[in-house]
Every structure is written in C-alpha cells, then in structure tokens.
Amino acid sequence: MKIGICSDHAGVEYKSKLISYLLRKGYEVVNFGTDSTERCDYPDFANPLGCSLEKGECDLGIAICGTGNGMAITLNHYKSVHAGLAWNTKVGSYVKTHNNANVLVLPARFISYTMAVNIVRIWLTSEFAGGRHQRRLDKIPR
C-alpha cells in the first residue's frame, strides 16, 4: 500500500518520524514535503497530495499542520478525497469506520507524537462500517 504524506512547517517533525514508522510497518511512502521548519503555506503541500490521490498514484494520505484544519479544508476540495481530522484514537477510528476517510489529518500543535502514532495505527487498521454511514456519505456533493 502506498501512503502519501505531507505537512507544513508545524507538522514537519511529526511527518519525518511518521515516515520512519510507516516504512518499518512495510508501507511505501511518498513524501510531498515540506522538509523544513521554515514558515510555509499548507496548500503548497496538500495540493500535490490531493492530486496524487485523484490520479490513483497513492492509496491513502496523511496530512499534518498546526491545527489540521488548513490541510483538511484544502484536501476536501478534491473529488476523490475524504479527509478527516483526528485528535485522539476514538476520533481516528471514526474517521475511517464512519467517514471512510482516505486521508487522515493530524493537528501537530495539539497532540503528542505518541498520540499521532496511535491515531495513525488505529486509522490504518480500521475498516469502513458501511450501512448507515454510506447513506450519509452519499449525501455529500462531489
């Protein structure tokens, strides 16, 4: 499975560590940047991830910024992207089981790295529940 990952300056440290974590778990990882703590604009990194998902070049994505909101807003403009923001493992589970999100968004300024890893683990191992949740997703214009 190929996972695209991106961050802005606020999430670069977590992104770097998560890339190592994902590689150890056997995932193929595509890094869409940034690789610097210099202030930058989240759409510059979210857009390439969104394009990659649209083209089917990556199976899933992880995006990290200060609050997670900028990445989620940007990524959800892509027709094939369902980006969900999670700040604990319960929400991380629901992002997949209820919302079938193919992109997990993390708020680096509001969670620990340990929490980030736990959320990623839960999200990657959870399955979409379908049923009433699919009915709800079908009501979202795309």
Image (cartoon, helix red, strand yellow):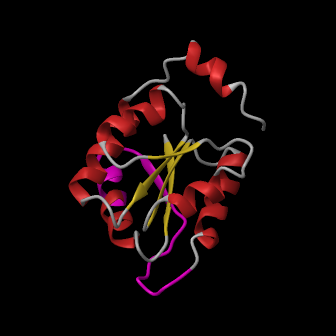
Residue 120 falls left or right of residue 51 = left
Marker count (numbered): 0
In percent of width and height, residue 138 lies at 71, 24
Is residue 16 depicted above or below 132 in this figure?
below
In percent of width and height, residue 55 lies at 73, 48
| Residue at the spot 40% in from the left edge and 59% down from the top edge | 107
In percent of width and height, residue 27 lies at 40, 45
Residue 75 falls left or right of residue 110 = right
Which quadrant of the figure has residue 139?
top right
Is residue 90 depicted above or below 76 in this figure?
above
Find out whether residue 70 is within the magenta segment. Answer: no
Which quadrant of the figure has residue 47?
bottom right
The single residue placed furthest to the top in the displayed view is 131
Instruction: Tell me the quadrant of the picture where the C terminus can be found.
Output: top right
Find out whether residue 20 is within the magenta segment. Answer: yes
| Residue at the spot 42% in from the left edge and 31% down from the top edge | 94
| Residue at the spot 70% in from the left edge and 41% down from the top edge | 80
| Segment colored magenta | 19-40
In-front residue for pair 67/104:
67
In percent of width and height, residue 32 lies at 55, 66
Is residue 2 depicted above or below 38 in this figure?
above
The single residue placed furthest to the right in the displayed view is 142
In-front residue for pair 59/130:
130
Is residue 49 depicted above or below 35 in this figure?
above
| Residue at the spot 46% in from the left edge and 26% down from the top edge | 97
The single residue placed furthest to the bottom in the displayed view is 38
